[in-house]
Amino acid sequence: MEIPQQLYLIHTISRTILNHYTTILNYFDNRSTNASAESFNAKIKAFRTQFRGVKNVEFFLYRLTKIYA
């Protein structure tokens, strides 16, 4: 028996809420988000694309810490 599309969407939303309810409630309790971590990840990705093809990983990590630490 196939689940109608609307019920499938509701089921998907409820699963997402159940999987992340502690994080969702944490926002309302403490007004804290992971925005700073997401911002840092975006900076790392931008830096990585600028220097793609890096062969020396140790030097790459050194430059990364000097710029963003």
Image (cartoon, helix red, strand yellow):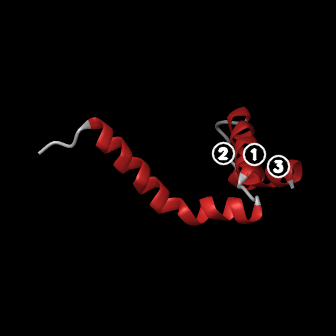
Task: Give me the disc on residue 55.
Answer: 2
Q: Earlier in the sequence, mark 3 or mark 2?
A: 2
Of circles 3 and 2, the one toward us is 3
Q: Earlier in the sequence, mark 1 or mark 3?
A: 1
Q: Amino acid at mark 2?
A: Lys
**Quadrant where the image shows the C terminus:** bottom right
Q: Is residue 37 left or right of residue 8?
A: right
Question: How far from the left and from the top, in percent, is residue 42?
Answer: 71, 42
Q: Is residue 31 above or below residue 4?
A: below
Quarter where residue 55 is shown: top right
Name the residue tied to disc 1. 39
**Residue occupying the point 64% across, 37% down:** 53
Distance of label 3 from label 2 (alpha carbons): 13 Å
Q: Amino acid at mark 1?
A: Ser
Of circles 2 and 1, the one toward us is 1
Q: How many marks?
A: 3
Question: How far from the left and from the top, in percent, is residue 57?
Answer: 69, 52
Q: Amino acid at mark 3?
A: Arg
Local packing at callout 1 (Cα closer than 10 Å; few below 14, some 14-19, many 20+) is few
**Residue occupying the point 82% across, 49% down:** 63
Q: Is residue 12 left or right of residue 20?
A: left
Local packing at callout 2 (Cα closer than 10 Å; few below 14, some 14-19, many 20+) is few
Name the residue tied to disc 3. 63
Disc 3 element = helix
Question: How far from the left and from the top, in percent, is residue 38?
Answer: 70, 48
Residue sitting nearer the eye, 51 or 12: 12
**Residue occupying the point 30% across, 43% down:** 7
Distance of label 1 from label 3 (alpha carbons): 18 Å
Disc 2 element = loop
Question: How far from the left and from the top, in percent, is residue 67?
Answer: 87, 47
Disc 1 element = helix
- For the residues labelled 3 and 2, say whether their Cβ atoms are less than 8 Å apart: no
